[in-house]
Each structure stands twice: as C-alpha cells, then as structure tokens.
Amino acid sequence: MQKIIYIYRIAVKLFSFAFFGLCSLGLALGLFPIMHVLAGFSEKKFKAIARRFNHWYFKVFVNVMKTIRCISVNVENKEQLSNIKSKVVIANHPSLLDVVILFSLIPNADCIVKGSLIENKFISLIVRNLYIPNTIPFDEQMERARQSMEEGNNLIIFPEGTRSRPGQPWEFKKGAARFALYSENDVVPIFFGGNEKIGLRKCDKLLQYHPTERYQYNLKVLPQISVAPYKGVPMTKSAIKLTEKMKMALEQELSNV
C-alpha cells in the first residue's frame, strides 16, 4: 500500500508541474494580449491587471495541489498580508514551490527572478513582462524595484539567492537589504517550515517525493523590520546590519521548530 501511495504522490507532483507549465503558457499567449487592450496599451496598467490575475492564478494552482493532496499550507498571522503595501517580503527558501505560495498569498507582488527563467519556454513571457530579472545591472534592478514599490507593489526576494542546501547553514546575501534601504521600505520576513521537501529541494531529482507524507508548508509571518534606524548610515554598513537582523529573525523561528 505504501508503494502505491508513493507512486500516486509522484504522479500528482508531475501533474502539478505540467498543469503549471501549460497554464502559464496559455496565460501569456492567450490572456496577455487581451490585458494589453484592456489597459489601453499602458505598460503600468497592464502590469497592475496582470499581477492581480497572476495572484488569482497562483491561488487556484495552490488550491489544486491541496485538493489532490500534493501539499498542505498553513499560515500563521496570515491577516498581516491582506493589506501590505510597498514592502520588501523576504523568506527562507527550502523548496521549489516557495515563490508560488508567496504569490498566492500576496495580491500585488513583484519579484526578483533568476534571469535563466527567461529561457524557460513555459514561463518566459510572464517573467519578461512582469518581473525583474537578476541579470540586469544591480543599480537598474534597485531602481525598477523602487518604482514598483512606489506604485504599491510588494517585492518578494529570497536573501539566499537560491534554494537552501539541506543540512547546510543559510548564507544570506546583502541584496535584499539593499533593496529595502534604497527604496526606504520596511521588511516583512516570512518563515517557511514544515516537513522536508524531498524532491523539491536544491539538487533533488524529479522523481523523488517525501517517503511517508505529502509536502507540509507551515508559514509564519513575522514582525516587520523597520529600515528607519539605518537612515543616514552608509549603505555598505547598513546593508550588513540589516541582513544580520533579517537572518536572525528567521533563524530564531527555525530554532523554535
């Protein structure tokens, strides 16, 4: 029986990947042109419409995965995300689905994305049209992020820059802190807990899954971190201090698990 359950879980995982890829491609090819027309060919209005739709799409996708028992999602302090505006949202990054879950929770989300995703034929149009690739000059990334947050969007960024390696300590880069300091927007840390995401972690194989249970995502929205204390402090020094504070907030939550 356990083997049958494991095979089922692999099957629903593959179905979820295929569902996401094909729906993303259909969204970009079929609905983006309509959204451009509805926005009067205004780039700013188009992005606002597309981001709202993307939030709905990610919510549907997460609910599909919950229905077929691929994942479970529980969020502590979820109400704090309902009206956030112009914030830098950071999180630890244990699995492939982290960004999907964050987009399903945050309606007006922008994101710093890996430039290599532009080469992914299923999601390249979405990435190119809506988000900020990390392959452009960093000064340009910061300015585009600042403008986006000025419009009320929230910037999602993983300070590690990539998925965590199982069993290894987190290594936070200073980029997330620099985005917050440059834009003068506070930080909202979100902790990802739950069971081991075997099959979704860095370097895991596609045909892997947790051996005994579905993926459990237990999130906790932590208190905001203000950037006000760093005003007037040189960027190099303040970015180090703010990065340490962000890491400490998430590591403290990890120690409580």
Image: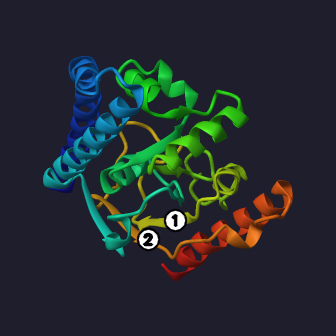
192 relative to 15 in the view: left or right: right
Around disc 1, counting alpha carbons within 10 Å, would you say few (fewer than 14), some (14 to 19), or many (20 or more)? many
Residue in the foreground of this view, choosing between 45 and 245: 45
Q: Quadrant of residue 213?
A: bottom left
Task: Please state the horizontal and vertical placement of residue 41, each as a whole percent of the image.
Answer: 33, 20
Task: Please state the horizontal and vertical placement of residue 130, each as a whole percent of the image.
Answer: 42, 32
Task: Please state the horizontal and vertical placement of residue 167, each as a whole percent of the image.
Answer: 60, 60
Q: Quadrant of residue 142?
A: top right
Residue designated by label 1: 188
Give the position of the N terminus as an image quadrant: bottom left
Pointers 2 and 1 in contact (C-beta within 8 Å): yes
SS at badge 2: strand
Residue designated by label 2: 221
Q: Is residue 67 above or below residue 144?
A: below
Q: Residue at x 49, y 74 (%)?
A: 222
Under mark 2, the amino acid is: Val
